[in-house]
Structures are given as structure tokens and as C-alpha cells.
Image: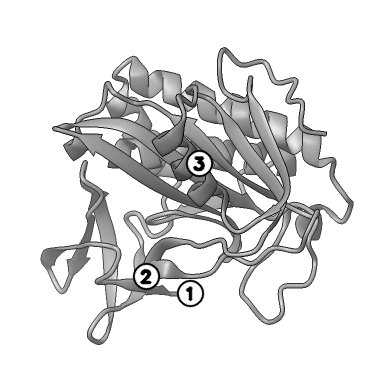
């Protein structure tokens, strides 16, 4: 399964497959520290025992039903202050795969790192950057995409199969993912950050519309922007406030 026949320049040309592992992101970080791992390397597993998302949340997936992987990128062209653009580009790549598979634009991005269908999580992204000075040296891009799983044990989640009513070939979804992520990554490399950000905001849940949030208390707000450093700008009672991902949550 894990020879990726995608139409890419570098992403997915080398694949490291593990039937099970504790975390593909941790394996990638270990390899970066100890070997000269090439850009575009994909580390993929059928069963991730200790996957995690933002805020240290666990990412639980049924073995063999979904895509759980990490990509190694070397975006040395990005300043550390621009690192959220990588999150935008990767999120758009995952979103395009979701919407292309569904055949319609049902998927949305929930800041900072989730892809939702009808407010149910279908995918998550976790990027860990290694900085050298003011530049990004390496990035480990962890991606979990629910493809064929149907039972989520009460969690507000969904899968592509759940929405389409049929099983999907993981290989086809994987090839679509690496193609789409590479396409957006190359746009970033060409410094098309304004184009990336415009498309990101277009698909951002709550952008220019009222949503319910929770911080120290619950409140209504309208997302006005996401800053280049990844802060969420929310209009609250006529005043614009900025939040990092630890300071605010969504009530959906």
C-alpha cells in the first residue's frame, strides 16, 4: 500500500511504513535528530498508539481505517514569525482532499488545526517546527484523516465514509493528500502568502459570522482575521481581541 504513486516533485517519494507506533511525529523528530532525513519523507502507520493534537489532546483512530502520518518539510524560506503560513497551507491541502473526495465544499477549517464537516471533526493537523535563528529549519507535519472509521464513541467526529456511505481506498486518499499539500507548499515557497491567506480565510469557520466562544467565560464573537503569527482576531462587543490557541475555544 505504501508506495505512493502521487504526481509530486518530492513529497511522498520516500515512505517509511510502520504497522504500529507510539507517534509518527515523535518518530520523525527522532530521525531528524539522528539521520539526514530528506524533505518530503512520509512516515505512516496503521495504528498510532499515542497520537496527539493541539492542547495535548489525544488523537484516537481505529487501526487500518484512517490515514495517520507525518511529513518532513524544510521550509527554510519562512521566517519563524511566518510559521503559521505553513499551518494555513497544509490545512488547505487537507481540506482540498476532503472536499474533492466529497464532491462538494462541505469541509471547513476550524482554527487553529482542524477540518470539520457539518461541525464534526474529520481531520487534524499538528505541526512541530525546529527553528535555527530566525528561520524554520525543519517542520514535522502530523496529519490524521478519518477515512473509513464509523464508530467514534460519543466524540463529535465524522469520516469520509460516514458522509459518502461507502468505503474508500486509503491509497487514493493518501495520494490526493500529498499532491494537494505539496501544491500549497510550493505556493508558499513562491511567496504567495496573500493568496494562501485569502483562501484560508474563505474556508475558515466563523469568519465574518457570529460564533459562540469560551475563554474565561462564554461570549459571542465574529472572527475578523488570523494574524501571520497565528493569533485569532475576534470582534467582541465592538472591540477586537487577539487570542492564542490556549486562550479560546469554540462552542459548536
Which residue corresponds to mark 3? Answer: 28
Residue at 41 percent of width and 51 percent of height: 204
Label whose residue precedes the other's in the sequence (1 or 3): 3
CA neighbours of label 3 inside 10 A, class few (<14), some (14 to 19), many (20+): many
Q: Residues within 10 Å of mark 1 (few under 14, many from 20)?
A: few
Tag nearer the camera, 1 or 3? 3
User: What is the secondary structure assignment of the residue under circle 3?
Assistant: helix
Residue occupying the point 43% across, 29% down? 73
What x and y, as percent, mark residue 102?
A: 72, 44
Q: Position of residue 247 (x, y in %)?
A: 24, 71
Q: Position of residue 55 (x, y in %)?
A: 38, 68
User: What percent of the width, then of the height, locates residue 50?
Assistant: 58, 64
State the separation of the CA atoms marked 1 and 2.
8 Å
First in residue order: circle 1 vs circle 2: 2
Left or right of residue 54, residue 221 in this image: left
In the picture of the structure, the residue carrying the numbered disc 2 is 211
Is residue 145 positioned above or below 51 on the image? above
Amino acid at each position: 500500500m505504501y508506495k505512493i504513486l502521487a504526481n509530486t516533485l518530492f513529497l511522498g517519494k520516500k515512505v517509511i511504513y510502520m504497522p504500529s507506533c507510539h507517534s509518527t511525529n515523535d518518530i520523525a523528530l527522532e530521525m531528524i535528530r539522528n539521520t539526514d532525513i530528506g524533505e518530503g519523507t512520509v512516515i505512516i502507520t496503521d495504528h498510532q498508539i499515542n497520537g496527539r493534537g493541539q492542547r495535548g489532546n489525544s488523537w484516537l483512530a481505529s487501526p487500518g481505517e484512517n490515514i495517520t502520518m507525518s511529513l518532513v518539510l524544510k521550509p527554510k524560506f519562512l521566517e519563524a514569525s511566518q510559521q503559521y503560513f505553513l499551518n494555513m497551507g497544509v490545512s488547505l491541502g487537507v481540506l482540498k482532499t476532503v472536499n474533492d473526495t466529497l464532491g462538494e465544499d462541505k469541509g471547513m477549517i476550524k482554527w487553529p488545526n482542524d477540518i470539520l464537516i457539518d461541525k464534526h471533526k474529520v481531520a487534524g493537523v499538528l505541526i512541530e517546527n525546529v527553528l535555527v535563528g530566525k528561520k524554520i529549519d525543519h517542520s514535522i507535519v502530523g496529519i490524521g484523516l478519518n477515512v473509513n472509521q464509523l464508530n467514534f464513541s460519543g466524540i463529535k467526529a465524522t469520516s469520509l465514509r460516514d458522509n459518502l456511505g461507502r468505503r474508500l481506498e486509503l491509497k487514493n486518499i493518501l495520494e490526493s493528500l500529498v499532491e494537494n499539500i505539496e501544491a500549497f507548499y510550493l505556493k508558499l515557497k513562491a511567496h504567495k502568502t496573500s493568496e494562501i491567506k485569502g483562501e484560508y480565510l474563505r474556508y475558515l469557520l466563523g469568519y465574518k459570522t457570529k460564533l459562540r466562544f469560551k475563554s474565561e467565560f462564554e461570549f459571542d464573537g465574529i472572527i475578523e482575521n488570523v494574524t501571520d503569527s497565528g493569533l485569532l482576531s475576534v470582534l467582541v462587543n465592538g472591540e477586537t481581541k487577539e487570542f492564542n490557541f490556549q486562550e479560546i475555544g469554540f462552542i459548536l
